[in-house]
Amino acid sequence: MSLLTTHVGSYPKPPALQKARTRFSRGEIAYEELHRLEERATRDWVEFQESIGLDILVDGEQYRGDMATYFAEHLEGTAISGLVRSYGNRYYKKPIVTGALRRTGPITVEWWRTVQEWTDRPVKGMLTGPYTMMDWSFDEHYGSRRETALAFARVLRDEARDLASAGASWIQIDEPALSARADELPLVVEALGIVTEGLPAKTITHTCFGNYAQLYPDLLKLPVDQIDLEMSNSGLDMIALFRKYPFTKEIAFGVIDVHTHVVESKDLVKERIRRALEVVPPERLYIDPDCGLKTRTVDEAKAKMTVMVEAAREVRAEIGAKG
Amino acid sequence: MPPEFRACVLNAYPRVGDAPEEQLLRRAIARHDTGEVSDEDLAKAQELAAEGAIREQEAAGLDVVTDGQVSWHDPVSHVARGLGGFEINGLLRWFDTNVYIRQPVAIGPIARQGPIVAPAVEAAKRVAHRPVKAIVTGPWTLAHHTKLGNGGDEEALARSLIPPLADEVRALAAAGADYIQVDEPSLARASAVPGIVSEALAAFATAKGTARLGLAVYFGGVPAVLPELLRLPLDFLALDLVQGAETVDALVGVRTAKTLLLGLVDARNTRLESPEAIARQAMRFAGATGSPECFVTTSNSLEFLPRGTARRKIEVLARAARIAGGRA
């Protein structure tokens, strides 16, 4: 099977869940009520993904706030800061490393297990990578970026192993920060390597919104089977580089811009897929959006994913017809 | 004469905090995006947020204040939008931070429609009890973050931005800005000062009126070009001495009569500095350089910190300046 479709991670939270999260943070509702809504929303997204025929599913991260903060909240040695601006009018609470990092138990495994029981299609285990956890945290303890990244790597290695033991055959370790400092790519490779070494699962890393031209082809040194790249936001610029230095790993190729309300036409998405096929063979090409869709409305996210899967299906048929 | 020590923020201040009353601007922008809030009401919310930022800086004891740049979408697209000739495109990481700017794409001739930053500075002047510093992003950094078409020339684009930005400097002076700071973070780690930057500052110096003109470089040091920067037609130079700590050796080796803004307080980490330690560093640099006036400031934008932490950091700035100046 080629041109498999998947998703990067998050889906938008329905308004009822958003309200419940606010009310829970104010102590107005019990955790059980919030959890019931998280589970309902997660189940809806799983059913939606199955209904459009997505090949590799995600749980949609309905129970997570920020992707770094979520993990920090479940670790010893951390605190959570007040709001900090990310871009435009979006803000998040950053982790603060206040002491030695320690995982007191599995963080994501129960959710993964629950969701995998609902579907026959594979569900990805989703982690935020050690370099990104370091780069997106304030460090008040280790005093060194390397020490902090490696400390996160050790706790995430244990989490990844628990996911694999539970049966996760696809494990994605997101590193959106990896382009922050080009000279630190060796640190990303080292830290990510601690998490993926010997892991009995297909390993993926997702990254986005950076200057990847300066990191390529060294990016291919990342110790994972598949690299998931945002391509549409940057106008498919990287394709020219892939012609010069072939992309030797599997690629998940972002064909949906997640930062526009406009739903792409099927023809535009098909064109992007065809452009990807110019540089990567179909058996190593996965189709997904540029990034998580949590900043879109539920309707926009559904429309974008539907167009994406239909476009991939049609291009798959074209290739089949030619073959 | 012993040097004077003062305190100010480098540029931005967090526009949103965790308390509900610190979220008014956030809500106004969200409702403006959906058409529920008019342009006028959004502008009012921005003025209120700026006033809040100014009040906090004054309460902390800063000697010069900014409007916190609370109305800026980001340091690049906010200025590019007002200069015309650009389309605003997708997200681009802002240096090595987890903050993203909207990247401008050069699509045609530059045509400034009117004041860009000046109206907010004029509003700040109406409510501030201390001198006001205006910020404008410089042509080198703007051009460097712009996506150029085929055959596009970054240097030519930067040069074309000088006249409209000089007009903006003139507008800022007319708006009453006491200090005008040109931010050129893309100069960090430069091996030479680009001719464009010298040309731009010469043009701005003729447009600044009675305001004091300065240059700020952050996200890294400037050890190779420090003497050159100090020869530019500037009244003050702002340096990042945290992420740009490599500038320190160069700094203690130069003499200058210019005002220095010493970015000693880390705006990218929540850990609080000791005012005494910061004061000692400021006194060391003032003594070594002979600068008659040194501001203790943040290494870069305080928007990288939560507002509660930013409040504590500016208290450190003010206290360090008082200690260094023998006023503690």
Image: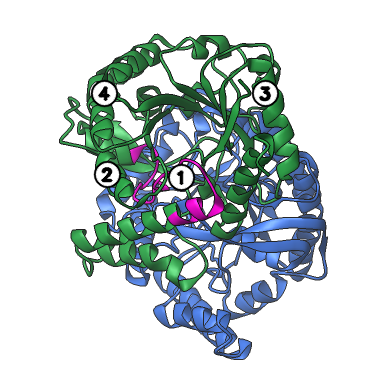
Q: Earlier in the sequence, mark 4 or mark 2?
A: 2
Q: Which residues are magenta?
A: B55-77
Q: Position of residue A295 (x, y in %)?
A: 41, 62
From where the camera sits, is residue B161 visible? yes
Q: Chain of mark 1?
A: B
Front residue of A280/A168: it is A168
Q: Share a chain, discs 4 and 3?
A: yes
Q: Could you give the CA–CA distance between mark 2 and mark 3, rounded to whole angstroms?
A: 34 Å
From where the camera sits, is residue A200 visible? no
Q: Secondary structure at mark 2?
A: helix
Q: Earlier in the sequence, mark 4 or mark 3?
A: 4
Front residue of A51/B34: it is B34
Q: Quadrant of the N terminus of chain B?
A: top right
**Is B62 contained in the magenta span?**
yes
Q: Chain of mark 2?
A: B
For residue A40, above or below residue A259: below
Disc 1 designates what residue?
Answer: B12
Give the amino acid at mark 1: Ala
* Badge number at residue B166: 4
Give the amino acid at mark 3: Phe
Badge 3, how many Cα within 10 Å: few under 14, some, many 20+? Answer: many
Q: Position of residue A322 (x, y in %)?
A: 36, 43
* Badge number at residue A64: none
Please state which of the two labelled residues, at mark 2 or mark 1, is closer to the viewer: 2
The residue under the point 76% across, 52% down is A152
Q: Is residue A299 left or right of residue A46?
A: left
Q: Quadrant of the C terminus of chain B?
A: top right
Disc 2 designates what residue?
Answer: B122
The residue under the point 31% across, 62% down is B45
Give the amino acid at mark 4: Ala
Q: Could you give the CA–CA distance between mark 4 and mark 3, rounded to whole angstroms?
A: 32 Å
Q: Which chain is blue?
A: A
